Image (tube, rainbow, N blue to C red):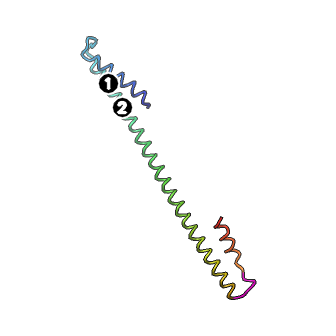
Amino acid sequence: MTTQEIMEQAQVFASAWSLVVSRFDQGDELANAEAMKLELREMVEAQAQEIAEYALANEDIHKWRNNYRGEISNLLIQRDELLEALVFAKEKISELHVELSDDDFHYPIINDAVDMAQR
């Protein structure tokens, strides 16, 4: 249903109403005008329903997008917290390494994880 179709029906209704009790009225113009009014009402109601359905669908899209943004924000926060924990662990391991004076004491998995998280 387009606005143009509704406007055209409004014109049909107005024309039909203008014939009621005119010299051209053969006794059936009031019934015809009422029928045109009913048709116009149905068209307007159909368009209102389409708009309401579109608004509801659009609202669901906005809710989904906002929820998705929230999840992304949470993931970024978790990533930052994990990075902080990895950096902390790397520092503590380095301190332990210095205390033990063990040249073969390495944790490449943590080093790799910190490097990947910082990218």
Answer above or below: position of 108 versus 43: below
The numbered dot on residue 25 is: none
Q: Residue at position x 26%, y 11% from top?
A: 23
Query: Does the magenta segment cover residue 101?
Result: yes
15 with respect to 61 (left or right): left
Residue 9, image x and y in percent? 38, 25
Tag 1 residue: 35
Q: Which residue occupies 72% across, 83% down?
A: 105
Position in image of residue 1 (x %, y %) = 43, 32
Residue positioned 25% across, 14% down in the render: 22
Q: Which residues are magenta?
A: 100-105
First in residue order: circle 2 vs circle 1: 1
Q: From the image, tell me which residue sits under label 2.
A: 42
Query: In the picture, residue 52 is in which quadrant?
Result: top left
Q: Which is nearer the eye, 52 or 107?
A: 107
Considering every residue shown, the one lying at the far right of the view is 104
* Residue type at tag 2: Glu
Q: Secondary structure at mark 1?
A: helix
Give the Cα distance between marks 2 and 1: 11 Å
Q: Residue at x 32, y 22 (%)?
A: 14
Residue type of the residue flagged with mark 1:
Ala
The image quarter containing residue 4 is top left
Q: Is residue 16 magenta?
A: no
Q: How many marks?
A: 2
**Residue 59, percent from left and from top:** 44, 48
Residue lying at the far top in this picture: please name it.
Answer: 23
| Crowd tier of the residue under label 1, counting other residues whose Cα lies within 10 Å: few below 14, some 14–19, many 20 or above | some
Q: Quadrant of the C terminus?
A: bottom right
Q: Are marks 2 and 1 in contact (CB under 8 Å)?
A: no
